[in-house]
Image (cartoon, rainbow, N blue to C red):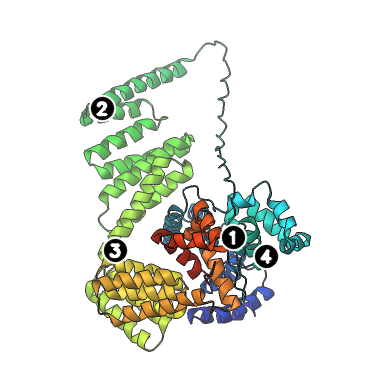
């Protein structure tokens, strides 16, 4: 029964019916509450509906049930990105990559999360953090008749403790009107609730010093002293063996000296002599393999590395020596690689080396091999003719409103020719139809990156931003497109639609629900947060409320007027 509900959920998700998908996945979870895949799928459905808090809960449950499943951390990272917690997203994607280092989805998600973190404030913390950790937080809330009642509510107190512990958590609670009222009290701002027209007063807040973290240094292991041995008479055979080992070490030293002088033939002769004198030290074999590698004799190098590994396991040699031989073998295999499949053997050798000893240099070589394999695969797969055929198939499915099928063909077209901006534009349109807005935005931005003069990229990006209710950003995108095509009617219509939505806030035409949603979205915007925590802008807003004549002078300042307009557009304030 659970599998049947899951299949229905998958079908609904593929068709873009995300509400229906959530319901089916919930039914499946009721029947199989320990199935981590069901929580993962429901998390994806919630994220597509922009319910990132619910998506986060399901992603956490997925990781709890299956901590060694990389896909769960991908869901966790996507939910954190949706909530604006870029640093938490970076951490989630990194944990996933520890489990599956070659997962392209996790790598892409990590890159997006790092970019989002880089765009955030330098300290990486919400500017509201200083307000919630001020010395008079609780006294202010107790003094206000509205927030005083909240102090009797356990869930409110828990919410406040979480925000004080991690200021970035505030983004999760901005939909709660109680949190909006708390912000108003702490900022000395009368927050305009749905249906009311009120103006703002801005108070002051003290900056909170940043705390520094020291990474705990790993304990250094003190080597145990070797037991002393009493002098004893050494048998002739043992004495001979020691002499041969000492002679082998001398040959090794001579080989090392010749290697440094680039006298490779002499070095090989000395290492070979050392191997004949002492077959219980695999370093002579690995050193000779290194010489063969330098000489370009890769097959001989690989043979020596295999001998070193085999003999090392028989002797139970140091795992680091075996890892060195496997790494050297991987280097030789990389040199021999001519096709993408040839890299598989090198990748396998590096992976085996890392199981013996996790050496950073070997890990870097593994990453290099995987990257080279991927690049070569793309080169081998590149075919513009087939790419055009796949694009046309995608266009046909798009016309039939079969958007998941269209996405599949557009994706194949991009694998065949990743430099065609038209395909990114078309796939962005499909994602928009499916409600997968973050993916659509990413494709539209890639389209513009590949061809800044291709106006379709701007119309796609603007449409996605409009549906995400980021009207000002959408307007900027449309205006940027008009620079390349001033007579484009689609871009002009897009600007008109954005202006209509922006002006709703100024006229007070938003419903209480729309106002609350726009305020919450605005409070997550770093620019809005910066304006509200700017002492100068606080005074400007106080003057608008208490000193109208002085406020008129502020309106003459274009920068101040622009910031006030941003607050109006975000539904934070209203000018009467």
Q: CA distance from mark 4 to mark 1?
A: 18 Å
User: Which tag, 4 or 2, sits closer to the chain's start?
Assistant: 4
Crowdedness near tag 2: few (<14), some (14–19) or many (≥20) residues, C-alpha within 10 Å: few
Q: Are the residues tagged 4 and 1 within 8 Å (C-beta)?
A: no
Q: Is residue 453 above or below residue 356?
A: below
The location of residue 439, given as percent across then percent down, is 42, 70
Looking at the image, is mark 1 or mark 3 nearer the viewer? 1
Circle 3 residue: 378
Circle 2 — which element?
helix
- Front-most of residues 17 and 343: 17
Question: How much space separates mark 2 and mark 3, taking CA atoms?
Answer: 39 Å
N-terminal of the pair, mark 1 or mark 2, is: 1
Q: Which residue is disc 1 drawn over?
A: 201
Mark toward the start of the polypeptide (1 vs 3): 1
Q: Nearer the viewer, mark 4 or mark 2?
A: 4
In this view, which residue lies farthest toward the bottom? 400
Q: Secondary structure at mark 4?
A: helix
Q: Which residue is mark 2?
A: 260
C-alpha span from label 4 to label 2: 73 Å
Task: State if disc 2 and disc 4 touch (CB < 8 Å).
Answer: no
Residue 500 as seen in the image, left or right of residue 266: right
Give the CA distance from mark 1 to mark 3: 58 Å
Mark 2 or mark 3: name the one nearer the start of the chain. Answer: 2
Query: What distance separates the C-alpha of mark 3 from that of mark 4?
Result: 53 Å
Whether residue 92 appears in this view of the structure is no
- When the figure is inspected, residue 16 is found, relative to residue 546, above or below; the finding is below
Nearer mark to the viewer, of 1 and 2: 1
Q: Are marks 3 and 4 in contact (CB under 8 Å)?
A: no
- The residue wearing badge 4 is 178
Local secondary structure at mark 1: loop
Q: Position of residue 507 (x, y in %)?
A: 51, 77
């Amino acid at each position: 029964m659970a599998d049947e509900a899951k299949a229905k959920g998958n079908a609904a998700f593929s068709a873009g019916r995300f509400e229906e998908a959530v319901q089916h996945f919930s039914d499946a979870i009721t029947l199989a509450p320990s199935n981590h895949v069901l929580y993962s799928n429901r998390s994806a459905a919630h994220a597509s509906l922009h319910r990132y808090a619910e998506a986060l809960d399901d992603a956490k449950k997925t990781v709890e049930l299956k901590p060694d499943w990389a896909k769960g951390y991908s869901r966790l990272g996507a939910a954190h990105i949706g909530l604006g917690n870029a640093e938490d997203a970076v951490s989630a994607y990194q944990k996933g990559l520890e489990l599956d280092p070659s997962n392209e989805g996790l790598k892409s998600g990590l890159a997006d999360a790092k970019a989002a973190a880089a765009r955030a404030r330098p300290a990486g913390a919400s500017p509201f953090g200083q307000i919630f950790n001020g010395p008079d937080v609780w006294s202010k809330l107790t003094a206000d008749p509205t927030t005083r009642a909240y102090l009797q509510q356990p869930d409110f107190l828990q919410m406040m403790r979480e925000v004080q512990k991690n200021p970035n958590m505030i983004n999760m609670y901005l939909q709660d009107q109680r949190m909006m009222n708390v912000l108003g009290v702490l900022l000395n701002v009368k927050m305009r609730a749905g249906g009311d027209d009120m103006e703002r007063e801005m108070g002051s807040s003290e900056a909170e010093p940043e705390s520094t973290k020291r990474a705990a240094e790993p304990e250094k292991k003190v080597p145990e002293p070797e037991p002393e041995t009493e002098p004893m008479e050494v048998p002739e055979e043992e004495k001979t063996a020691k002499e041969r080992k000492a002679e082998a070490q001398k040959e090794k030293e001579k080989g090392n000296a010749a290697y440094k002088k680039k006298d490779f033939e002499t070095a090989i002769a000395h290492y070979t002599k050392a191997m004949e004198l002492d077959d219980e030290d695999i370093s002579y074999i690995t050193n000779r393999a290194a010489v063969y590698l330098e000489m370009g004799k890769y097959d001989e190098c690989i043979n020596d590395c295999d001998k070193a590994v085999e003999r090392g396991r028989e002797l139970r040699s140091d795992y680091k020596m075996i890892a060195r031989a496997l790494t050297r073998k991987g280097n030789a295999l990389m040199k021999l690689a001519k096709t993408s499949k040839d890299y598989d053997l090198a990748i396998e050798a590096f992976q085996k080396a890392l199981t013996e000893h996790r050496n950073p240099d070997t890990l870097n070589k593994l990453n290099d091999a995987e990257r080279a394999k991927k690049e070569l695969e793309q080169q081998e797969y590149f075919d513009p003719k087939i790419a055009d055929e796949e694009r046309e198939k995608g266009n046909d499915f798009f016309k039939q409103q079969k958007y998941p099928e269209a996405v599949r063909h557009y994706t194949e077209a991009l694998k065949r020719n990743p430099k065609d901006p038209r395909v990114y534009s078309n796939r962005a349109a499909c994602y928009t139809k499916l409600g997968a807005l973050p993916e659509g935005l990413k494709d539209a931005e890639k389209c513009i990156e590949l061809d800044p003069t291709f106006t379709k990229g701007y119309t796609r990006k603007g449409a996605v931003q409009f549906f995400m209710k980021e009207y000002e950003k959408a307007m900027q995108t449309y205006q940027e497109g008009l620079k390349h095509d001033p007579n484009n009617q689609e871009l002009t219509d897009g600007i008109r639609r954005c202006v209509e939505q922006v002006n709703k806030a100024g006229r007070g035409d938003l419903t209480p629900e729309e106002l609350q949603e726009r305020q919450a979205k605005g409070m997550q915007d770093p620019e809005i947060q910066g304006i509200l925590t700017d002492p100068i802008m606080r005074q400007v807003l106080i003057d608008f409320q208490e000193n109208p004549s002085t406020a008129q002078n502020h309106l003459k300042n274009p920068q101040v007027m622009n910031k006030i307009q941003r607050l109006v557009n975000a539904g934070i304030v209203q000018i009467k």
